[in-house]
Image: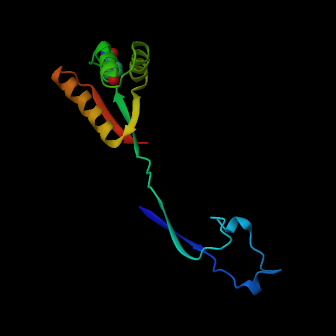
Amino acid sequence: MRRHLIRKSKPLPPHERGAGFVRAASDDEDNDGKFESGLATKVRPKTKRPNLYRVLLLNDDYTPMEFVVGILKEVFNKDQESAWQIMMHVHQNGVGQCGVYPYEVAETKVMRVMDTARKNQHPLQCVMEKE
Ligand code: TYC
């Protein structure tokens, strides 16, 4: 947690509060006519954005198109149409993106793809790369 020090200015003696020593009413946050002094700490919860990773499928000459479509539906939650489009993109371009995820999610998806491909004796390759 990060703490920010907030310094409020020292209260002025009455004789210094005339012209040239005017203070904004908004400086008196609790509106009690007095100006707080000393240190206050505000706590701001740290919300770090996770590093994201692209998960990519690589083309090969042997994995059946329907198997790749099945993977995209099962592992990457694609519907039939977008699964088919992604598979065709990979088929025609050599590589294509299945999704973007935080590190551990991406890693799990790559492992599921590689495991399923190996169990079915297909050479399908899946990799992840930092966004
Ligand atoms: N090129 C494969 C074929 O013609 C299909 C394929 C598509 C394979 C995408 C892998 O990631 C891939 N059967």
Marks counted in the figure total: 0
Q: Is residue 67 left or right of residue 39?
A: left
The color scheme shown is: rainbow
- Say which of 41 and 102 sits in front: 41
Q: Position of residue 125 (x, y in %)?
A: 28, 29
Q: Position of residue 77 (x, y in %)?
A: 36, 22
Residue name at image x 46 percent, y 66 percent:
3
Residue name at image x 64 percent, y 77 percent:
9
Which image quadrant is residue 108 in?
top left
- Say which of 71 and 44 sits in front: 44
Q: Position of residue 41 (x, y in %)?
A: 49, 68
Residue name at image x 52 percent, y 70 percent:
40
Residue name at image x 69 percent, y 82 percent:
12
Which image quadrant is residue 122 in?
top left
The quadrant the C terminus occupies is top left
- Say which of 72 and 96 sits in front: 72
41 over 13 or under it: above or below:
above
Q: In the image, ligand 1 is in what quadrant?
A: top left
Q: Is residue 79 left or right of residue 36?
A: left
Q: Position of residue 130 (x, y in %)?
A: 40, 44
**Outermost residue, right side:** 19
58 over 39 or under it: above or below:
above
108 over 89 or under it: above or below:
below
Which image quadrant is residue 32 in?
bottom right
The quadrant the N terminus occupies is bottom left
